[in-house]
Image (spheres, rainbow, N blue to C red):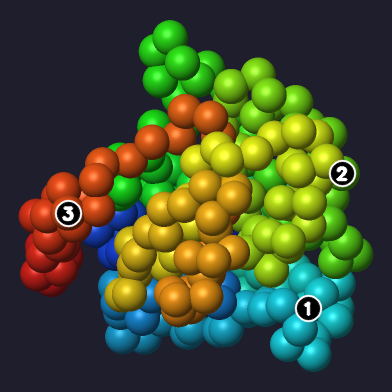
Amino acid sequence: MIERVPVSLVGAGPGDPELLTVKALKRLQQADVLLYDALIDERILEETRPDCVKIYAGKKCRDGQNPQERQDEIHRQMALHFRKGKQVVRLKAGDPMIFGRGMEEVRFLESESIPWEVVPGISAGIAASSAFALPLTERNKSRMVLFTSGYTSSGETPGCDPLVSVIKEGGTVVVYMGLTKLHCLLEVMEKAGIGNIPLMIADRVSQEGEQLLAATTDTVLTRLESVRVQGPSLVMVGKYLETLEPKELLESLYQQIPDTSLLT
């Protein structure tokens, strides 16, 4: 009996091809069929073989698609191509298991008795912490991190009690897709008596146009009036969230400009 190659749910990381894991790159190069998300850098797609069938499976906010119908179609495509004997790779931005609906796809594959694997990717929150030298945790200061989403599945702002508790305990909160809900987040913190603490907006992490807007909960709205934020963006907030001075940070980032020739 021929052993079937599992469907691979692969994390593409935050954007920069050099942040792919070795295993992720191998799976891309082995793929017969690639179902890929929105926000995947074109250079990552170019790592596939010329004969690889690439199928766009992205979903964006307010793009007119029914999210569940779109997800059902992704499930159908994975099963269809697997049963044709193809090596199927489902490429997801960031990490499949952090706001990536990865577990929904794992459950579907299990229900169809289709073998699967998950290849981790660097999530944007982790990438932003490293790229901008923002300590999510630090000895004797912050010992907890909360990753949360700015939206529930119905598009509402999620409950903010955990967010407030973590900030008051000195922890750091990273809000994915949080920029459009920034006013709500600031209002919640103000009502909870949290004011004038560091708040960072990490924009297009590891992608062209990457930037960090460093502010506080009191100044961020004024800062946004003079800075163009393209998105996707993360909102990061915490008492001990510090960064280098802007000049030092800029010099550091210039030294880290990736050499993409390493992937060719």
Work out whether residue 111 or residue 62 is closer to the camera in this orientation and state it: 62
Please name the residue shown 69% across and 35% down the image. Answer: 194
> Which quadrant of the figure contains the C terminus?
bottom left
* Residue drawn at the location 42% of the way across and 67% of the way down: 204
Nearest to viewer (mark 3 / mark 2): 3
State how far apart marks 1 and 3 are (Cα).
Answer: 45 Å
Residue 80, relative to residue 114: is it above or below? below
Q: Gap between marks 2 and 1, in whole Å? A: 27 Å
Q: Element under label 1? A: helix
Q: Name the residue under label 3.
A: 247
Disc nearer the start of the sequence (3/2): 2
Residue 227 picture location, percent across and down: 43, 74
Whether residues under marks 2 and 1 lie with C-beta atoms below 8 angstroms apart, the answer is: no
Element carrying mark 3: helix
Q: Mark 2 points at which residue?
A: 159
- Disc 1 residue type (three-letter): Arg
Q: What residue type is labelled 2?
A: Gly
Residue 60 seen in render: yes
Q: Regarding mark 2 in the picture, which secondary structure is present there?
A: loop
Residue linked to disc 1: 70
Horizontal side, residue 96 vs residue 209: left or right: right
Find residue 256 and report its image quarter.
Answer: bottom left
In front here: 207 or 182?
A: 182
**What's the residue at 71%, 51% (across, down)?**
186
Residue shown at 73% from the left, 61% from the top: 183
The mark closer to the camera, 2 or 1, is 2
Residue 114, image x, y percentages = 70, 54
Q: In which quarter of the image is residue 41?
A: bottom left
